[in-house]
């Protein structure tokens, strides 16, 4: 885990099968700064079983003002590619 990253999931306890195959990771951008895992996880679980969710947060100077704005993106890994095209 790196600074500015919040992680949910990973292999379940006692997992012996291989990790999800390539192509199961999805990039989701422009996440509003006031939304966190408690709202995101139930939303994404409607699409498929989550292997891993990494919520990346960083502060960037807005070019139009001196206020700090929060930028959030997500890297979401599903157990399989079946529902990936939903996004």
Image (cartoon, helix red, strand yellow):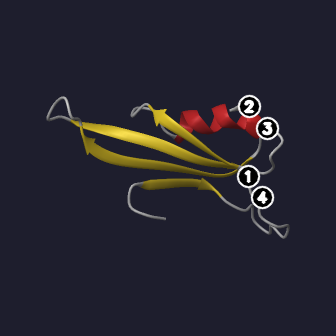
Mark sitting earlier along the chain (2/1): 1
Q: Position of residue 44 (x, y in %)?
A: 67, 36
Rate crowding at label 1 as few (under 14), some (14 to 19) or many (20 or more) other CA atoms within 10 Å: few
**Cβ–Cβ under 8 Å for marks 4 and 1:** no
Looking at the image, residue 32 lies above or below residue 13: above
**16 with respect to 77 (left or right):** right
* Residue 23 - label: 1
Q: Which residue is mark 3?
A: 83
Q: Nearer the viewer, mark 3 or mark 1?
A: 1
**Cβ–Cβ under 8 Å for marks 2 and 1:** no
Separation of marks 2 and 4 at Cα, in angstroms: 17 Å
Q: Indicate the secondary structure of the residue bearing disc 3.
A: loop
Q: Indicate the secondary structure of the residue bearing disc 2.
A: helix
**Cβ–Cβ under 8 Å for marks 3 and 2:** yes
Separation of marks 2 and 1 at Cα, in angstroms: 13 Å
Q: Which residue is mark 2?
A: 86
Separation of marks 3 and 2 at Cα, in angstroms: 6 Å
Q: Can residue 42 be seen by looking at this rendering?
A: yes
Separation of marks 3 and 1 at Cα, in angstroms: 11 Å
Nearest the viewer among 87 and 17 is 87
**25 with respect to 61 (left or right):** right
Q: Position of residue 45 (x, y in %)?
A: 71, 37
């Amino acid at each position: 885990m790196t600074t500015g990253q919040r992680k949910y999931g990973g292999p379940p306890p006692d997992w012996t099968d291989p990790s999800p195959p390539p192509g199961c990771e999805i990039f989701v951008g422009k996440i509003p700064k006031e939304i966190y895992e408690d709202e995101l996880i139930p939303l994404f679980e409607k699409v498929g079983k989550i292997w891993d969710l990494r919520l990346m947060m960083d502060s960037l100077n807005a070019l139009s003002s001196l206020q700090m704005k929060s930028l959030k993106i997500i890297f979401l890994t599903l157990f399989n590619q079946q529902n990936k095209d939903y996004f």
